[in-house]
């Protein structure tokens, strides 16, 4: 079963040069889609930058997520490795 949770849309207009000119701007559009299929969450990000389209899929396993204790342990090990 494939469930589509919701879409998020936003648009950002940014200046394309060193000085801001409202007549000349780059357009960045982002659209996010979230779907659950089986035990996987898929986040689809669609970007449109100056007419070029990009699509990025991120897939997360909902069953094999680390617990908060495991995450804290990993962070402590990482910090100990950085200090040594």
Image: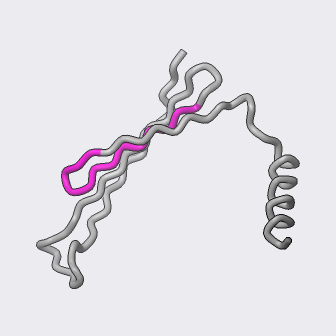
Q: Give coordinates of residue 18: x percent, y percent.
A: 23, 83
| Vertical order, 28 against 32 (above or below) | below
Q: Nearer the viewer, residue 38 or 76?
A: 76
Q: How many marks?
A: 0
Left or right of 39 on screen, residue 66: right
Quarter containing the C terminus = bottom right
Q: Quadrant of residue 55?
A: top left
- 78 inside magenta stretch: no
Residue at the outermost top position: 1
Q: Give coordinates of residue 56: x percent, y percent.
A: 42, 42
Left or right of 21 on screen, residue 71: right
Quarter containing the N terminus = top right
Q: How is the image coloured?
A: one colour
Mostly what secondary structure, the magenta segment?
Answer: strand
- Which residue appears at 48% of the width and 28% of the height? 4
- Which residue appears at 21% of the width and 84% of the height? 19
Q: Quadrant of residue 41?
A: top right
- 43 inside magenta stretch: yes
| Vertical order, 6 against 78 (above or below) | above
- Which residue appears at 26% of the width and 55% of the height? 49
| Vertical order, 63 against 20 (above or below) | above
Left or right of 53 on screen, residue 30: right
Q: Give coordinates of residue 59: x percent, y percent.
A: 56, 34
Q: Which residues are magenta?
A: 41-53
Q: Nearer the viewer, residue 83 or 53?
A: 83
Q: Give coordinates of residue 51: x percent, y percent.
A: 19, 51
């Amino acid at each position: 079963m494939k469930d589509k949770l919701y879409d998020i849309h936003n648009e950002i207009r940014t200046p394309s040069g060193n000085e801001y000119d409202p007549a000349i701007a780059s357009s960045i559009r982002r659209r996010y889609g979230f779907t659950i299929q089986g035990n996987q969450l898929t986040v689809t990000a669609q970007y449109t930058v100056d007419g070029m389209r990009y699509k990025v899929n991120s897939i997360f396993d909902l069953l094999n997520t680390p617990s908060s204790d495991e995450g804290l342990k990993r962070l402590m090990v990482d910090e100990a490795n950085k200090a040594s």
